[in-house]
Image (spheres, coloured by chain):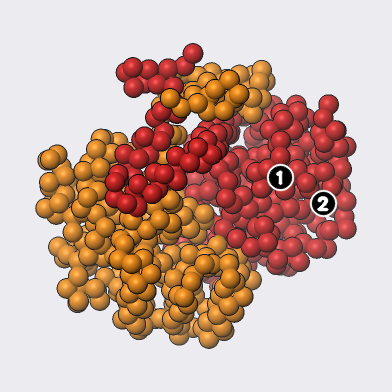
Chain colours: A orange, B red
């Protein structure tokens, strides 16, 4: 067995940190390591926490860590922040806030930024989850920073998705919730001491009921919890709901792990195929100089980008005489 | 010339609406139309408006339209909302709010959602911009709803990016701005009558100064404007700044249009190649049943997803004996 793999399985923090950094930067022979780790994954329970900036996700994660540690569970945290160009995606504030856990060996916190390469955010997050899973963490918390499509995609690969909102988000509350409503297993109205908390709960309830048929939630009815993360109110109850959801999943997946659940596997494989495809082709496009040449031609007005992209892509695929793909 | 193309060039609203819907849904022979339209693009000035939900982007866009119409300019608006699974991505509130322009022939408003197919948000937005450009709109306003990486990518293909924030966004203000700071040409502190507006301006100023070296902004120093969009305060001044930025671009791009600027062309071609690649390969993967078969094998534990994705991708690419790509 690969030495790195052994070290990860034994929980060596420095190796885990290095491998996750390599995943994030898209360097090193990550695939071989992940293949070897794969048989050791599928044991951790993965919780996603998403919501707009400012709703207090980090504070909530902080308190969740404390409760899980009280229960003697080990915790891995991934702060997914694709929009930050600074310090490799780590948000200083979060780091500072989470510092109190930094001396606790049972907690491992890392940021993922995944800028500038082609694997995609979901794939990097998936890989980082695998590493934390293989190192033996009981729970893995995946916190997103943005609220775009990328973040929604990330939420599709966790066990339980917690969507955090706050009272009084105004006109745009519908816009915010539309996309993440679909992926939310539990809804948290944080800062619930603020005016309008009950109204927000009601609005959420209405939206969930209105769209019940769209979400294939089956028998799971997403609960809505009022929480004051800052004062640790409602966080224990939130974790109870997470466990209730875990029970629900177990019954409905007939004991299958996250990695084996068909819908998640589909999502995951799609991302991996995309990543592999784009990476391989772009390496060659850049190495050969063809990409750069096409850029020049477009700039000079010799060709339109639609035709140029066709000329770059099609000769690199195995197509048969009908223009369809031929695989031998 | 294709009949549809002629109709678009003559400004036929129904045809434009249909083509943009096809772009959004990923159906129809869009590429041929876009190729034919290409020579007629590059005349419109494209303004991006981005920021978290709740900062009042729609209201700002609404007022910008009014001012541009007062100047006898025609306006196209694209509301980009990848996170909405409802009503084809159109946000009801926005539609209602913008209704007053609906009888004005000089204004054309459409939403883009781009869910469920592979071309990608940036590419669809680029294509929709081309259509509005070819139909003769003077200004095209691109408003994003989310604040994820997708939205940042969209902002890379416009001329001038306006980043909207509001006072008192709390702890996460740094997180919000980190990603979009890089793409922002003009910053707007909206709802500037609220407490803390000056503090927010100062914070923005500090962040811009701190990171000056990172952004290759050249000689352009992004201005920060206090605006009260709801009361139409500062919107005229904002458009003045947009024009100032347009002047700056003209001088520094030596008269090149957006479509010919090398950095933008690179970004655009990258997206188009990705889209074309993924679309072509996935069509075949699904048609042949190979994707589905791999999913089953992973579910049954016969193969790990890393190996499976390799087996799906590599035989579909033209690789030489060294495992590198070979192009003939």
Location of residue A143 (image quadrant): bottom left
Q: Chain of mark 2?
A: B
Residue sitting at 85 percent across and 46 percent down? B13
Choose between B174 and B112: the one closer to the eye. B112
Which of the marked residues, 1 or 2, is nearer the chain's N terminus?
Answer: 1
Q: In the rendered image, which residue does mark 1 sit on?
A: B22
Horizontal side of B138 relative to A158 (left or right) equals: right
Horizontal side of A99 relative to A47 (left or right) equals: left
- Horizontal and vertical percent for residue A279? 41, 33
Horizontal side of B43 relative to A146 (left or right) equals: right
| Badge 2 element | strand
Instruction: State whether residue B144 appears in this view.
Output: no
- Horizontal and vertical percent for residue B162? 61, 50
Q: Would you call the spot at circle 2 few (<14 residues within 10 Å), some (14-19), or many (20 or more)?
A: many
Residue sitting at 43 percent across and 60 percent down? A155
Q: In the rendered image, which residue does mark 2 sit on?
A: B107
Q: Chain of mark 1?
A: B
């Amino acid at each position: 067995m690969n030495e790195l793999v052994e070290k990860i399985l034994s929980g060596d923090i420095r190796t885990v940190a290095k491998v996750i950094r390599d995943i994030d930067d898209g360097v090193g022979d990550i695939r071989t390591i992940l293949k070897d780790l794969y048989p050791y994954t599928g044991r951790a329970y993965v919780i996603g926490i998403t919501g707009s900036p400012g709703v207090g996700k980090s504070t909530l994660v902080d308190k969740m860590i404390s409760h899980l540690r009280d229960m003697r569970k080990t915790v891995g945290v991934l702060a997914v922040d694709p929009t930050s160009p600074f310090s490799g995606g780590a948000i200083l504030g979060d780091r500072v806030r989470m510092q109190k856990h930094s001396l606790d060996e049972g907690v491992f916190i890392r940021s993922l930024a995944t800028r500038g390469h082609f694997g995609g955010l979901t794939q990097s997050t998936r890989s980082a989850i695998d590493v934390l899973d293989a190192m033996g963490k009981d729970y893995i918390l995946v916190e997103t920073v943005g609220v775009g499509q990328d973040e929604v995609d990330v939420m599709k690969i966790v066990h339980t998705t917690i969507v955090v909102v706050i009272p009084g988000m105004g006109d745009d509350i519908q816009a915010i919730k539309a996309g993440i409503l679909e992926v939310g297993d539990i809804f948290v109205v944080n800062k619930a001491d603020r005016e309008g908390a009950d109204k927000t709960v009601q609005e959420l309830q209405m939206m969930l009921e209105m769209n019940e048929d769209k979400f294939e939630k089956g028998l799971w009815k997403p609960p809505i919890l009022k929480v004051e993360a800052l004062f640790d109110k409602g966080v224990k109850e939130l974790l109870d709901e997470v466990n209730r959801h875990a029970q629900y999943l177990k019954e409905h997946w007939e004991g299958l792990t996250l990695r084996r659940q068909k819908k998640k596997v589909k999502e995951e494989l799609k991302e991996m195929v995309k990543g592999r495809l784009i990476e391989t082709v772009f390496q060659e496009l850049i190495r050969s100089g063809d990409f750069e040449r096409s850029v020049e031609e477009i700039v000079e007005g010799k060709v339109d980008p639609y035709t140029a992209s066709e000329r770059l892509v099609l000769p690199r695929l195995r197509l048969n005489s009908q223009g369809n793909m031929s695989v031998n």
